[in-house]
Each structure stands twice: as C-alpha cells, then as structure tokens.
Image: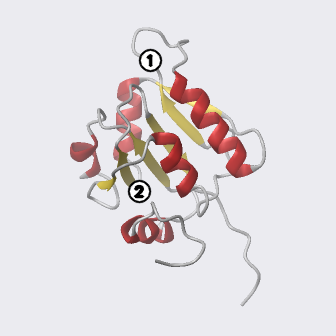
Amino acid sequence: MLRGIDQRLSAEIVHVLMLMGHGDDLVICDVNHPAASIARDTTHGRLIDMAGCDIPTAAAAILTLMPLDTFVPAPVWRMQVVGDAAAQMPVFAAMQAVIDRAEGRPVMMAPLERFAFYAAARRAFAIIRTSDSGPYGCFILRKGVIDLPPL
C-alpha cells in the first residue's frame, strides 16, 4: 500500500494509468460488456478486473489519479441504449456526478452507438471490468494532461 492511493486501485491499475499518455482512452465497464475479447485488441492487451466495485466507485478511485482531457469537447463516452438513443439509465447520472466532482467542473459525456462503442473500446489503451451488473455501465475516459512543476 502507498499513501494517497485509493486501496481499490491495484498495482496493475496504477501501472496502466502511469503508462497512459495524454489522449489515451481507458474503458471502465460492467460485467456484461464483452471485455475479455475486446481487451486483447487494446494497447495493454489484457483485461484488468476491479472486483468488488461498481462503476461510479471504480471511476471515482481512478479519477483521483487520472485527469480528463480538456482539449476535446467530450472526454467521456458512454454506450447508448439499444433501440432508444434518448434513454437515460441511472448509471449515466451517477457517472456524470462522479466525473463532474472529480474535475471540479461540468464535463460533457457523449453517447456512442453499441457497435461504435465496441470499436472505440478496441482502440483504447486498456479495459477495466468492474463487478457492476449494469446494464449499460460502459464508459470510455480520455486521459488529460497533468500540469507538473519543473524538475
């Protein structure tokens, strides 16, 4: 264990977050997402499990270390409901609250059609699967820049 790092963040998760650069995408998904098969195509190449966490809890822990991109209008994407693009699931509002709180500002979250979401997930840096039972608990977060002091 280390000080200041949420205990739900495994060494693998911290390592992946450290490897990611500005503009890299991280998928956080529920147990229904085809994460194992899609993860093979990501940069990391294998699935990361974050057992015992729901989507908002996992995202809140991850966002303590990872800023969202401020150079794009919507640094977060969610899977839209199949057959009803305007539908709002409870997890959408829960995630919106988490990302807004983590960033200290309103953050735009854009919907992606199911198969467009799968394609974007394959291009992501990594996929973290939570124990959330869903449905539609599938999000892509684009990493931003951390303004660090000079060495």
Within 10 Å of disc 2 (Cα), the crowding (few <14, some 14-19, many 20+) is many
How many numbered tags mark residues here? 2
Foreground: disc 2 or disc 1: 1
State whether residue 92 is above or below residue 97: above
What colouring method underlies this structural image? Answer: secondary structure
Q: Which residue is mark 1?
A: 81
Image x and y of residue 65, in percent:
59, 64
Q: Which residue appears at 50% of the width and 71% of the height?
A: 18
Image x and y of residue 52, in percent:
37, 49
Picture quadrant where residue 151 is located: bottom right
The alpha-carbon separation of the residues under discs 2 and 1 comes to 24 Å
Please tell me which residue lies in front, 42 or 139: 139
Q: Is residue 98 left or right of residue 91?
A: right
Callout 2 secondary element: loop
Residue found at the very far left of the displayed protein: 37
Image x and y of residue 21, in percent:
54, 65
Please tell me which residue lies in front, 12 or 146: 12
Q: Which residue is mark 2?
A: 125
Nearer-N-terminus badge (2/1):
1
Please, what is the three-letter code of the amino acid marked with disc 1? Val
Picture quadrant where residue 122 is located: top left
Q: Which residue appears at 53% of the width and 41% of the height?
A: 56
Question: Is the Cβ of the residue at disc 2 closer than 8 Å to that at disc 1?
Answer: no
Q: Is residue 117 left or right of residue 72?
A: left
State whether residue 78 is above or below residue 84: below
Callout 1 secondary element: loop
Q: Which residue appears at 30% of the width and 37% of the height?
A: 31
Within 10 Å of disc 1 (Cα), the crowding (few <14, some 14-19, many 20+) is some
Can the viewer see residue 71?
no
Please, what is the three-letter code of the amino acid marked with disc 2? Phe
Q: Which residue appears at 28% of the width and 43% of the height?
A: 35
Q: Which mark is residue 36?
A: none
